[in-house]
Image (tube, rainbow, N blue to C red):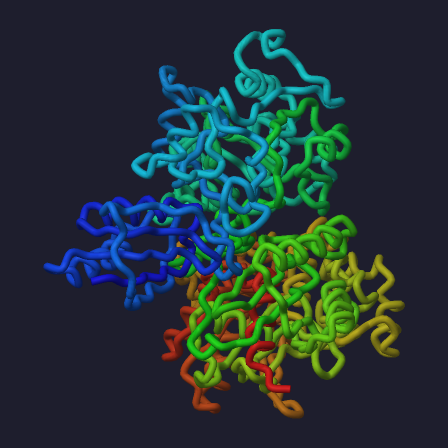
Amino acid sequence: MAETIRVRGLVQGVGFRPTVWRLARDLGLTGDVRNDGEGVLIRVWAPDAGGTDAIDRLCERLRTRCPPLARIDAIERGALDLPPPEPAQFLILASAATGAHTGVAADAATCAACATEVRDPTDRRSRYPFTNCTHCGPRLSIVRAIPYDRANTSMAVFAQCPACAAEYADPADRRFHAQPNACPVCGPRVWLADAAGRALDPADLAGGDAIAAASRLLAQGRILAIKGIGGFHLACDAADAAAVARLRQRKRRFAKPFALMARDLDVIRRYCRVGEAPAALLASPAAPVVLLDRLAGLPVPALAPDLAPGQSTLGFMLPYSPLHLLLLADWDRPLVMTSGNLSEEPQCVDNDEALGRLGGLADLVLLHDRAIVNRVDDSVVRWMDAAPRLLRRARGYAPSPIRLPPGFAEAPPVLAMGGELKNTVCLLKDGQAILTQHLGDLEEANTAREYERTIDLYLALFEHRPERIAVDLHPDYRASLTGRGRAAREGLELVQVQHHHAHCAAVLADNGWPLDGDPVLGIALDGLGYGTDGTLWGGEFLVADYRGFERVGWLRPVPMPGGTRAILEPWRNLVAQIEVCLGWDEFRRRWPGLELARQLEERPVPLLRTLMQRRLNAPLTSSAGRLFDAVAAALGLCAERISYEGQAAIELESLAVAGSTGVREYGSTGAVAAAAGVGEGYACGLIEGDGGTLLDPAPLWCRLFDDLAAGVAPGPISARFHAGFCLAVADLAADLAQAQGLARVALSGGVFQNRLVLEGVSRRLRRRGFEPLTHHQVPTNDGGLALGQAVIAAAWVG
C-alpha cells in the first residue's frame, strides 16, 4: 500500500517536515517528505497488514498535531505505483526547485522554550538575542525567495558552527531546518553605538553586555534606536515625561499615540483592562499591538501623560524577540516602542540608513548585523464586537495567504494595487489571496518608493505573473497611476474598481462568501472614495456582490470647502454642515449666544460660503468621516487642524466613552452603559432622492446645538451623536435590505474602526433580524481594500 500525500497551506519553515517524519515513524510507515513550490509532498509506504488504516491515521494526526505556526488548507491523497525504499526508513529530502505555489510564514514571537534558554545562565544560548527554532523567529523579514531555505534568507552569510549544524540536521530536534538557527559562536551579533555610529564598549557603561547597557541608558532617560525583527524602533521610558516629550519633538509626532511594550501581562494590567481573549492575543505568536482600555486612576509607576493624547486606550505589545525580552527583563513599567522614522516616513531597516535618518532622533543606537530583507511594521489589533479586529496587518500576520471563497479556485492571477492610504497590495493565485504587509500612505515619497519595491519583491517571491491589474477608480491615486502604467507596459487587462464596492467585496471575501452567493446590503463608511458620479463618496449603502453594485442610499452630500484642506481642518466641515443642513443665517438666528458661533465668525466663513455656493474648490462628498470631523469641531476637538489621519474621530469616540452613561439605544458593549438618565441619541432624517434614500443629519445638528446652548458637556453630546448615528445607519440599512429581500448586511470602511460604531450598528442589525458581516482577516480600513479589488477583478467579465 503506497500513496502520495500533498499538503497545501502554510507548511514551510514551520517544522512541518519533522512532524511528518516523527508521525510516520511512530506509525511504522516508510517513505519520504520534501518541500516544493506547492507545499509539502509526502510519499508513504505502509505494511500490507492495516496499511490503509496507518495512512489514514497519519493524515488525521497531521491535522490534530499540526505545528503551532503551520496552517493546513488541504490534504490531497493519490495512489503511488513505486516499490518501497530500501532499507525501510522514512527520510526528509532536500527541497525541490519548482514553481512557487505555497505561502511564506509570518514572523513569529519567541516561543516559551527559546525564552527559557535565553534566560538560563547555564544554557549555551544564555542572553543570546537571536535565539529561535522552527516554532518562532523571523520569516518574512529575512526571506528572499521560495523555497524558504537558509540559502534564500539573510542568514545565508552566517555559517553554522558544529553544534548548530547538528541541531539543524537532526529531525528529532526542534531546530531541524530552522533557517535562522544560530548561537553566540556562529550567528549575528548585537552592539551599542552612539548617534554617529561609533561602537561603544559596554564595559565603559557600567559593565554587562550591549543590551544590559541599553536598558540602563533607557532608565536614565535616554532615547534609543533599536534594530528589531522587521525594522527599527525608537524607545524611551514610558514613565519619563521629559523623555517622551523629547521623542515627540524629535520625531515630529505631536499627537499620534505611541505604542508601548511591557515585560509581561502583569505590567500591562497595572494600566489597562486585559480580558482573557485580549491577553491570549498579546501572548500569541503574532504578538500584535493590542488597543486596551485604560484603567481609571493613577497607576504606579505613573506613565507620561501624553503617550496617547485624547484617547481612552493604550496600545500595548509584549516582547516578541529575545532582544526585547532581555531589554525589558528588569522593567516594572513599559517602554515606548514606536516606529523608527520621522512622522509618516517608512520605518528604517538598514544600519547605515538608520544612522543617517535617526541620528538626530536617538541618543544611541542598538544595532545588529542580521540584514532585514523586508520591512515589516508591528500589527495593530482591537478587540471589538467579541472578536479581534485588525487595524494594521503586518508582522505576525502577513503574508499568510487568505483562502478565497468557493468559486474562485479557477480565478485568473490578479495584481491589485490597493488604495492611497494604509496601502497593501494583493496577489490572487491558486485560489488564495496574498496580501503584503502594511506599506503606509503613498502620499509620502519614501513610502511610494517602498511600495514599488515591494510589488516587484512579491511578484518575484511568489513567481506571480498577473493577467489582470485592479486599481481604484480615483484618477490621481499613486497606486492607480502605477497600476495603469504597469498594465499598459505589459499589455495586461486593467480593471477599475469603485472604492466602496471594493470595501464591500473585501468583507465578503473575508467571510468566505461564495462567488455566486446572493447579494448583500453593504454599508461602507469612510473618509472618502471616488464615486461613479464624479463626486466623493463615503457614507454608502450598496446592494453588492463581487460582480457589481447598485447605490441605494447615502449620507446627504455636503461640500468640502477648500478641497483637501477640509480633511486637515475640521472646522471647514462644520461650516459646510451648517450651511447645507440649516443655513448659516438660520444657525445664527436660532442660537445667537452660542460660543461656537462666535468662534466660527472669527474665521473666513463668508469666503467658504461663496466657494460652496459657486462650487469652487468645494467638491461634494457623502463622507461619514467628514461628518465625524464636523461634530468633533463643534465640540472643540481638533477644530483648527488634525495632526494625523482620523484624529478628530478618534478623540470624538474617546469623549463619547467618557460621557456615555445613560445613553439609550447605543447598542455597544463593555465601554458604554445603557442606563437611563442622559437621554436618547440624536435622530437623523431621511430624504427620498433621485435613485436612493439620503440619510439627513440636519435633525441631529438641531439637537446638538440645543444641547450646547443648554450647557450640556461635550462628553454626553458625543455619546448622543454616536448613539443616534448608529441607530440611523442600522435602521436605514435594515429597511433597504428588507425592501431588497436581503438577509445579510456587510460592514466596511474606516469608520468601523470606531468600536462604538461597529458594536452599535451590529447590535441594532441583529435586533432587526439581520446578520452583520464584519472583517476578521484584513482591516476594515483601506488596508483591506486590495483584497476587495482583487476578488472583483477576478469575477470581472470584460
Q: Position of residue 332 (x, y in %)?
A: 45, 24
Of the pair 142 and 419, the residue shown nearer to us: 142
Q: In front: 379, or 178?
A: 178
Camera-side residue of 682 and 2? 2
> What is the quadrant of the C terminus in the image?
bottom right
**Residue at the far left in the pictured view:** 49
Say which residue appears at 57% left-offset and 77% top-offset. Answer: 794
Residue 662 position by quadrant: bottom left
Number of numbered tags placed on the structure image: 0
Q: Position of residue 299 (x, y in %)?
A: 46, 31
Residue 360 lies, in percent from the top left, at 76, 29
Along the viewing direction, whichever of 290 and 109 lies nearer the viewer: 109
Compared with residue 384, is residue 472 higher up or lower down, i.e. above or below? below
Q: Residue at x 21, y 52 (%)?
A: 29
Location of residue 448 by image quarter = bottom right
Q: Is residue 74 left or right of residue 724?
A: left
Viewport quadrant of the N terminus = bottom left
- Asked if residue 374 shows in the view, the reply is yes
Residue 289: x and y, percent? Answer: 50, 44
Q: Is residue 110 left or right of residue 599?
A: left
Above or below for 414 versus 600: below
